[in-house]
């Protein structure tokens, strides 16, 4: 049987998974022992797997995660206040389907961003769309987008994102315009999507940080009351993981 026309048709239809599996089957010495249904099932499985891998690759690229992290590699041994049962619950991604948030607070270097990106990577693996944003820089980008007409598009993109990471909350002072932008973003997401916030400030200090009683009430009402809370403490993970110490330095 001539396979070339079949190969060309699979290539034209962009069924690359089936094409690769078909060519591999042609090299199998015992392929004749498989029934038609078995061979077809193998082709379909390969196509499905490769399509899902491509979709996952696209979701991860669009997420723009700051670090390449996975929930399986979260360090649960180093004492820093991690609740293992809470992490296990978050790993299931059920909180995303329930449109709940997650607030990760702790000192610099403790691993807040790493854990947030690990949860986002798991969300991508489960079929959700995620997006990482470093909040101080993004608020500046929003100001620019209002001048060049991209502002409505940016807000619409964030509103459609299943899981949004707002990293470094509380690093820079908020202007009145920043407060309005945050309220717009969080209002679009309230009870519709999930948000992860990382901050060096404890949640109890966020109201004072926002520095506007009415806006703080509105923003935090949409963010805090339906959220898991991870409060980290301890030495910087960068310090712990570093191979260099003061005793290693050659003078």
Image: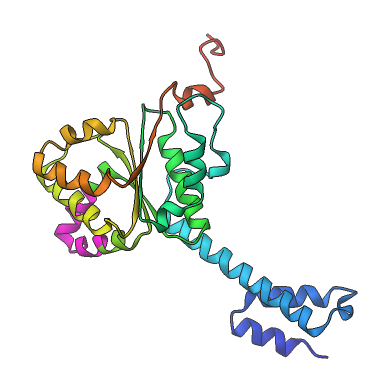
Q: Residue at x 45, y 54 (%)?
A: 94
Q: Position of residue 180 (x, y in %)?
A: 14, 50
Q: Residue at x 15, y 41 (%)?
A: 216
| Above-or-below relation of 106 to 223 | above
Q: Position of residue 108 (x, y in %)?
A: 37, 28
The number of callouts visible is 0
- Which of the two residues, 207 or 144, is positioned nearer the viewer here? 207
- Which of the two residues, 184 or 103, is positioned nearer the viewer here? 103
Q: Position of residue 67 (x, y in %)?
A: 47, 43
> What type of secondary structure mainly makes up the magenta span?
helix
Colour approach in the figure: rainbow
Q: Is residue 27 magenta?
A: no
Q: Which residues are magenta?
A: 140-155
| Above-or-below relation of 126 to 88 | below
Left/right of residue 44 with respect to residue 140 in the rendered view: right
Q: Residue at x 49, y 45 (%)?
A: 89
Give the image quarter of residue 113.
top left
Left/right of residue 105 with respect to residue 221 in the rendered view: right
Q: Residue at x 71, y 87 (%)?
A: 6
Q: Is residue 143 magenta?
A: yes
Q: Quadrant of the N terminus?
A: bottom right
Q: Position of residue 138 (x, y in %)?
A: 26, 48
Whether residue 38 appears in this view of the structure is yes
Whether residue 68 appears in this view of the structure is no
Give the image quarter of residue 217.
top left
Left/right of residue 113 with respect to residue 151 in the rendered view: right
């Amino acid at each position: 049987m001539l396979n070339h026309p079949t190969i060309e048709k699979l290539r034209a239809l962009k069924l690359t998974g089936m094409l690769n599996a078909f060519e591999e089957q042609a090299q199998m010495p015992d392929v004749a022992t498989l029934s038609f249904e078995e061979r077809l099932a193998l082709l379909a499985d390969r196509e499905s797997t490769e399509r899902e891998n491509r979709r996952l690759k696209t979701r991860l690229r669009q997420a723009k995660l700051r670090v390449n992290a996975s929930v399986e590699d979260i360090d649960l041994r180093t004492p820093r206040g991690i609740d293992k049962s809470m992490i296990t619950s978050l790993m299931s991604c059920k909180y995303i389907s329930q449109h709940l948030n997650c607030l990760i607070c702790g000192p610099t270097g403790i691993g807040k961003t790493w854990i947030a990106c690990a949860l986002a990577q798991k969300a991508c693996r489960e079929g959700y769309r995620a997006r990482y944003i470093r909040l101080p820089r993004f608020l500046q980008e929003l100001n620019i987008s209002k001048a060049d007409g991209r502002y409505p598009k940016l807000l619409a993109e964030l509103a459609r994102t299943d899981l949004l990471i707002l990293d470094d909350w509380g690093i820079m002072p908020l202007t009145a315009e920043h407060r309005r932008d945050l309220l717009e973003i969080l209002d679009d997401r309230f009870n519709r999507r999930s948000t992860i916030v990382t901050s060096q400030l404890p949640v109890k200090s966020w109201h004072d940080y926002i520095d506007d009683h009415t806006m703080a009430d509105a923003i935090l009402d949409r963010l805090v009351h339906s959220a898991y809370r991870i409060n980290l403490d301890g030495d910087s993970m960068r310090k712990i993981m570093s191979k260099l110490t003061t005793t290693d330095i050659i003078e």
